[in-house]
């Protein structure tokens, strides 16, 4: 079966089943063991054709948490942030210079919990405008790169790590970057959404 063209219309059709951007009151306070988790928000930014990738960063090795790891732009809320989606957009602007008006928000994926650092991450998904540009803030980001959307459609691409300290985590193949942990798990959720039948008109 030929790969899709990954147009903005195709992506919108596949992603219409995302959770709404607004977080309900019930979701704002996690239940049970997640009640003590620290909140964070990330931007899962998709570049439609002709770029055709999801935007990822490698965190600076100077950072205190998750240093040197692959992640999405994002971080913890500031007191001035009115919502978690504003956190994700603000952090993307601070970390990689991505302007807010260059992102079309489509919704969010289910929260992802990190066991070691006890973060509850809310991933917001958006389409990048054709003219969108970015540049790493050296104090926070060592590298910016794209993972091809075509890879997300390959069910054999993500692998479960079976040995070592990372046992049980997911990983995605990349020639230059080690994509695993929470980032890999969020990518897997995105991939499953993209593999679902389309909803609405594609263009």
Image (cartoon, helix red, strand yellow):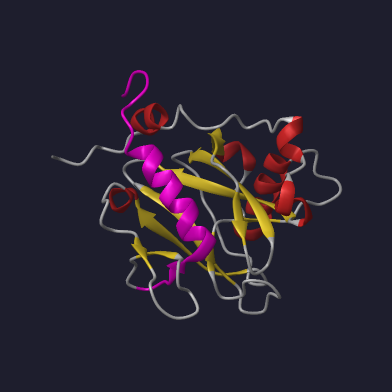
Q: Which of 133 and 95 is in front in this view?
A: 95
Q: In this view, does 140 lie to the left or right of 148?
A: right
Q: How many marks?
A: 0
State which quarter of the image contains the N terminus.
Answer: top left
Where is residue 198 shown, x and y percent of the image? 33, 26
Which residue occupies the extreme top position in the image?
A: 201
Vertical placement of residue 117 versus 87, above or below: below
Vertical placement of residue 55 versus 105, above or below: below
Q: Which residue is drawn at 51% across and 59% down?
A: 183
Where is residue 147 shown, x and y percent of the image? 38, 57
Residue range in magenta is 176-203
Vertical placement of residue 108 versus 115, above or below: above
- The quadrant in which residue 97 appears is bottom right
- The quadrant in which residue 8 appears is top left
Q: Which of 141 and 121 is in front in this view?
A: 121
Q: Nearer the viewer, residue 96 or 125?
A: 125
Which residue occupies the extreme left position in the image?
A: 1
Which residue occupies the extreme front position in the image?
A: 32
Is 182 within the magenta?
A: yes
Q: Residue at x 64, y 69 (%)?
A: 116
Q: Which residue is drawn at 33% across and 30% down?
A: 10
Q: In this view, does 15 lie to the left or right of 64?
A: left
- The quadrant in which residue 33 appears is bottom right
Q: Which residue is drawn at 24% across and 37% down?
A: 4
Is 190 within the magenta?
A: yes
Vertical placement of residue 199 versus 73, above or below: above
Q: Is residue 18 left or right of residue 64?
A: left
Where is residue 154 shown, x and y percent of the image? 26, 51
State which quarter of the image contains the C terminus.
Answer: top left
Where is residue 124 shown, x and y percent of the image? 58, 42
């Amino acid at each position: 079966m030929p790969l899709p063209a990954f147009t903005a219309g195709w992506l919108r059709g596949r992603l219409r089943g995302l959770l709404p951007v607004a977080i309900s009151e019930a979701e704002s306070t996690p239940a049970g063991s997640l009640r003590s988790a620290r909140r964070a928000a990330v931007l899962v930014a998709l570049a439609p054709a002709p770029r055709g990738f999801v935007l990822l960063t490698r965190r600076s090795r100077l950072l205190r948490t998750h240093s040197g790891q692959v992640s999405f732009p994002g971080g913890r809320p500031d007191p001035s942030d009115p919502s978690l989606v504003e956190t994700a957009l603000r952090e993307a602007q601070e970390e990689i210079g991505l302007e807010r008006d260059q992102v079309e928000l489509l919704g969010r994926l289910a929260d992802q919990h990190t066991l070691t650092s006890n973060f509850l991450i809310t991933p917001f998904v958006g389409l990048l405008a054709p003219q969108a540009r970015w540049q790493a803030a050296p104090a926070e980001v060592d590298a910016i790169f794209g993972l091809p959307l075509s890879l997300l459609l390959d069910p054999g691409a993500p692998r479960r790590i079976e040995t070592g300290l990372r046992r049980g985590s997911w990983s995605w193949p990349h020639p230059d970057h080690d994509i695993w942990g929470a980032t890999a798990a969020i990518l897997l959720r995105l991939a499953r959404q993209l593999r679902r039948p389309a909803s609405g008109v594609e263009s």
